Image (cartoon, grey):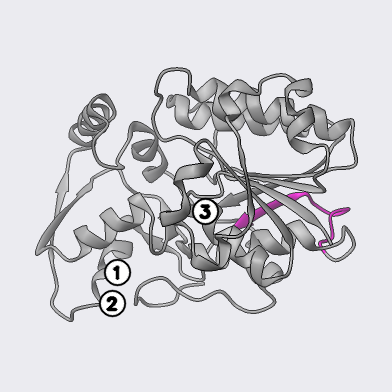
């Protein structure tokens, strides 16, 4: 039985991946910074699984991963930080830790799956985004059995950002930056969990890894940010909300203020992402699910 360690297993993405792995019959190990405190965040089905303490920001050398991974077949890294706190820096969490893990995987018979993000560009001003790209590049430079997963915007129960967007969608008015011109393809986090379980447990042939080790994932609808909010709103009411467009510079200043105060999930990185498309050029979600993905909210399906 494949033994899978999920890093960040109590987080928004991680706990859905853990549940899908449990349902698929994997031998699961849940990694967390505070493994003795995560039970309230896990589905009851997951309470009996082994837990291990993992602090990616402290594991920045390949040998540091040895004792944690010596009995593991697959490691799924769902760890990410929206904002820096102390030693938990973008460089350590998004780049140095994953790079060291990839180097360890290069030296062992270990599959390494990294959850990254869509829309990463070399010229990004946000360190949140640039560090994720550097992490991807470090992983790709190794000969490890690596897989990169880049989801679009996520929706589902238990997510900080998803909760905020659902709450905004219920208000009688909402604001949208004038430069939020990108299209996104929001997907359900439960379906992302299923896709990650498939990547953990599938063979290289089944996953067609010889063709590509990169999986860009999104839902079936291509919507603007405004349309996404309106789509979420239609899930609970037929009444329309007033949308107010604000100048991009105001949105940028607001994002910096949110970062400074660690308030709301809106960040400078998200402000950057809204200005460009955040949808897959080739969407591989249906390939991993074995069925078409379900739409998020209620909106008009677009090609």
Q: Residue 235's mark?
A: 2
Residue count near mark 3 (Cα–Cα under 10 Å), binned few <14, some 14–19, many ≥20: many
Q: Main secondary structure of the magenta part?
A: loop
Q: Are marks 3 and 1 in contact (CB under 8 Å)?
A: no
Q: Which residue is mark 1?
A: 232
Q: Is residue 303 above or below residue 93?
A: below
Percent x, y for residue 239? Answer: 13, 77
Along the viewing direction, whichever of 251 and 91 lies nearer the viewer:
91
Percent x, y for residue 131? Answer: 54, 26
Residue 207, quarter of the rendered image? bottom right
Compared across the picture, whether 243 is left or right of 38 comes to: left
From mark 3 to mark 1, how far is it between C-alphas?
20 Å
Q: Are marks 1 and 2 in contact (CB under 8 Å)?
A: yes
Q: Quadrant of the N terminus?
A: bottom right
Residue range of the region highlighted in magenta in the rendering = 207-217
Q: Which residue is mark 3?
A: 13
Residue sitting at 67 percent across and 63 percent down? 21
From mark 2 to mark 3, how far is it between C-alphas?
22 Å
């Amino acid at each position: 039985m494949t033994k899978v360690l999920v890093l960040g297993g109590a987080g928004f993405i991680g706990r859905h991946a853990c549940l899908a792995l449990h349902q698929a019959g994997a031998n699961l190990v849940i990694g967390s910074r505070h493994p003795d405190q995560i039970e309230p965040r896990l589905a009851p089905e997951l309470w009996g699984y082994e837990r291990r303490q993992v602090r990616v920001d402290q594991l920045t050398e390949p040998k540091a991963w040895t004792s944690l991974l010596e009995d593991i077949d697959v490691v799924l890294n769902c760890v990410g930080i929206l904002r820096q706190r102390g030693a938990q820096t973008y460089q350590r969490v998004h780049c140095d830790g994953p790079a060291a893990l990839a180097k360890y995987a290069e030296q062992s018979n270990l599959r390494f799956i990294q959850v990254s993000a869509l829309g990463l560009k070399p010229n990004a001003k946000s360190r949140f985004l640039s560090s994720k790209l550097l992490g991807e590049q470090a992983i790709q430079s190794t000969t490890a059995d690596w897989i990169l997963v880049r989801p679009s915007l996520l929706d589902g129960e238990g997510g900080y950002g998803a909760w905020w967007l659902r709450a905004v969608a219920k208000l009688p008015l909402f604001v949208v930056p004038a430069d939020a011109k990108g299209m996104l393809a929001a997907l359900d986090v439960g379906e992302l969990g299923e896709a990650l379980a498939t990547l953990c447990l599938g063979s290289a042939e089944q996953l067609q890894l010889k063709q590509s080790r990169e999986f860009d994932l999104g839902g079936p609808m291509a919507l603007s940010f405004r349309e996404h909010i309106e789509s979420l709103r239609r899930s609970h009411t037929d009444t329309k909300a007033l949308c107010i467009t604000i100048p991009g510079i105001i949105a940028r200043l607001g994002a910096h203020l949110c970062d400074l105060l660690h308030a709301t999930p809106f960040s400078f990185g998200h402000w950057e992402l809204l200005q460009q498309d955040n949808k897959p050029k080739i969407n591989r979600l249906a390939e991993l699910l074995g069925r078409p993905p379900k739409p998020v909210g209620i909106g008009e399906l677009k090609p």
